[in-house]
Amino acid sequence: MKVHHSARTDVGRTRDHNEDSYGVGEGESVERFGELLVVCDGMGGHAAGEIASRVAVETIMSDYYATHDEERAAALEQAFSHANEQIYASGRGTMGTTGVAALLYHDALHIANVGDSRAYLIRDGEIRQLSRDHSFVSDQVAAGLITPEQARSSPHRNVITRALGYQSEVSVDLFRWPVQIGDIILLCSDGLHGLVTDEEIAEIAVAHASDEAIDRLINLANERGGSDNITVAIARVDALDWDAHPVREVELADEHARATAELSVPEAAAPPVEPVPPAPSVTPPARAVERRLTLLGGLLAMLLLSVLLFGILFALNRPAVELAPPTTVPALASTAAPSAGPTSAPSPAPTISPTP
């Protein structure tokens, strides 16, 4: 999968230090285990939050890429758990951090999150929040007690219900989502989504390149008060592992197979006229079904033709049966010889003599 990314953090307008941290995968490990982006928002008093977020990012990044297990989502979850252990061991519950990560691996997006830092997917201009906020106001919205608009201005909006480092164990939410070419994945701390609406985030991310989009989003949050540290990371999907480019139709030369086939043609393959065989994820069941349907259609046509011919023959023979000569019994009766039995001649009419 081909991805390009950008990330930036800003202290905001009201804080004197930045407790946010972020990390982005680099080097050969990315080719093998996927692109990983992490955003953490620390808390716990002066410097403690900064330490917690930095430890979380460093531990998640190093642990994930050091794990060679085939189950990459499990490796990501394990990295979060280890980060929680590291922070808890250092602060014994006195410091903590949110954590949200996006892993792009084998044409799929894996999201892991603890706390209220968010992961968004922007596709075809539409934005969807993939992570789930672990916060007091989020629970109130889910229960129908307040609206999302009221949550944005609630005095309890910064109260989170789950974090890395506050307890010896932590539950990590995991989500998986298939990706498409052109998808935009955006991670951010609440310093952004607390001041900028989802619709505004989508509009800016779609309209501008990643670096400029991040600058515009951070500037907009600062214009609206910049009441918290602001961190944004953006990744854009340029190509997929198995179906990296739009399909095109190619006429098959074989006259016995007059059909069209969808072939994936990578950008790197130079003359476009020479099609490349489909990638492993493209399977041929659709064409096989098409062939079966063609055979069935032929059989149905032959059956219908046979029924039609039978009907025509039946119609032609039916009048001959109806016009067959009638029985000749009446004619035979009129010409037959007298029966052999005795007959009586008609009696002569009586003679009447006149009276003298």
Image (spheres, grey):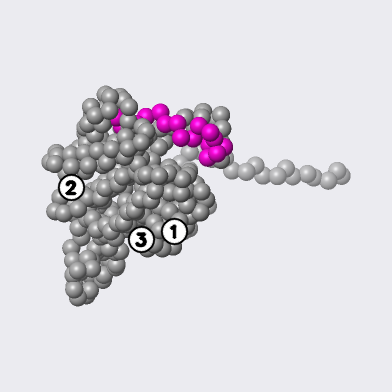
> How far separated are the C-alphas under marks 1 and 3?
9 Å
Identify the residue at the far right of this view: 356
Disc 2 residue type? Phe
Magenta-span inclusion, residue 165: yes
Residue bearing mark 1: 216
Residue at which label 3 appears: 211
Q: Position of residue 228 (x, y in %)?
A: 44, 44
The quarter of the rendered structure image containing the N terminus is bottom left
- Magenta residues span 150-166
In whole angstroms, how far apart are the C-alphas of marks 3 and 2?
25 Å
Task: Find out whether residue 163 is within the magenta segment.
Answer: yes
Q: Earlier in the sequence, mark 3 or mark 2?
A: 2
| Percent x, y of residue 240 | 25, 56
Looking at the image, is mark 1 or mark 2 earlier in the sequence?
Answer: 2
Q: Amino acid at mark 1?
A: Arg
Q: Main secondary structure of the magenta part?
A: loop
Residue 252 visible in the snapshot: yes
Quadrant location of residue 111?
top left
Whether residue 136 sits left or right of residue 231 in the image: it is right
Quadrant of the frame with the C terminus = top right
